[in-house]
Image: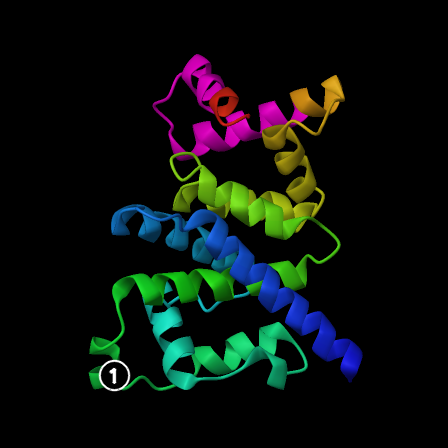
Amino acid sequence: MSIILGAIAAIATAATTVVKSVAVIGLAIQGLKAIGNALVSLGKALGLIKPEIKTEELGDKAIQSGYNPADYDSYAEYVRDVENYELDPEKSKQISEEEKIKKGMELASGVMIEKYQDFPMEDFCIVVGQNPDFFTEPKMKEIAKLVETDSQYISSILGYIDGSEKDDMKLQDIIDTLSTVEKTTNPNLSDKDALKNVLEIRK
């Protein structure tokens, strides 16, 4: 039991780290919302979050419920109970939009980190949050398809963006893949502009 508790505590900590890393001081609420929606959309597309729930609603339920992930055998079970919690509309008015978004983002990150614990999902979530212009909700759905086909794409995309991947063939493969994602979500974009957008997200 202590092993499970330790693992869930580590996931909860990692999820909090994601939020702290991307919800920087001074970030406008619209920017925060875009990041939160992107992460929650990825969680939905991977089948880890109910498709009908919104980012703020998820966060609101987590705050109001007071449920603690440490009381569960898995982070996914915690998220499931939060999703089924009945909100009190009056209490909702007392919680800021920012708090709700951050909490929703935290739960989305946590459930994905747990599911893909053999891959650097925490760092991937941070990269998504740091590049909101590229990692939009429609792109998250396309990236989820890649991850479901091969979870290694989490590492591949991250390796491309943070510069840790040095293999030219692997780099070209991920550039081509991300360019295809860019074109799929922006059909009117030229190949040249799609490639330009992909190259711009690399550090």
Viewer-closest of 126 and 176: 126
Say above or below: 114 vs 135: below
Residue drawn at x 40%, y 16% as measured from the top left: 190
* Snapshot quadrant of residue 154: top right
Residue at the farthest top position: 192
Report x, y in % for residue 67. Answer: 49, 84
77 drawn magenta:
no
Q: Is residue 83 left or right of residue 68?
A: left
Viewer-closest of 103 and 168: 103
Residue drawn at x 39%, y 77% as measured from the top left: 63
Say above or below: 184 vs 47: above
> Is residue 194 in view?
yes
Say above or below: 193 vs 147: above
User: Where's the C terminus, which quadrant?
Assistant: top right
Report x, y in % for residue 155. Answer: 69, 40
Report x, y in % for residue 26. Answer: 30, 46
> Is residue 54 in view?
no
Is disc 1 surrounded by few (<14), some (14 to 19) or many (20+) residues within 10 Å?
few
Viewer-closest of 197 and 64: 64
User: Which kind of residue does numbered mark 1 sit on?
Assistant: Lys
* Snapshot quadrant of residue 135: top left
Say above or below: 8 vs 168: below
175 drawn magenta:
yes
Viewer-closest of 27 and 85: 27
Report x, y in % for residue 25. Answer: 35, 49
User: Where's the N terminus, which quadrant?
Assistant: bottom right
The secondary structure type at the circle numbered 1 is helix
Main SS of residues in magenta: helix
Specify the segment rendered in magenta: 173-197
Residue assigned mark 1: 91
Residue at the farthest front position: 25
Residue drawn at x 52%, y 20% as measured from the top left: 199
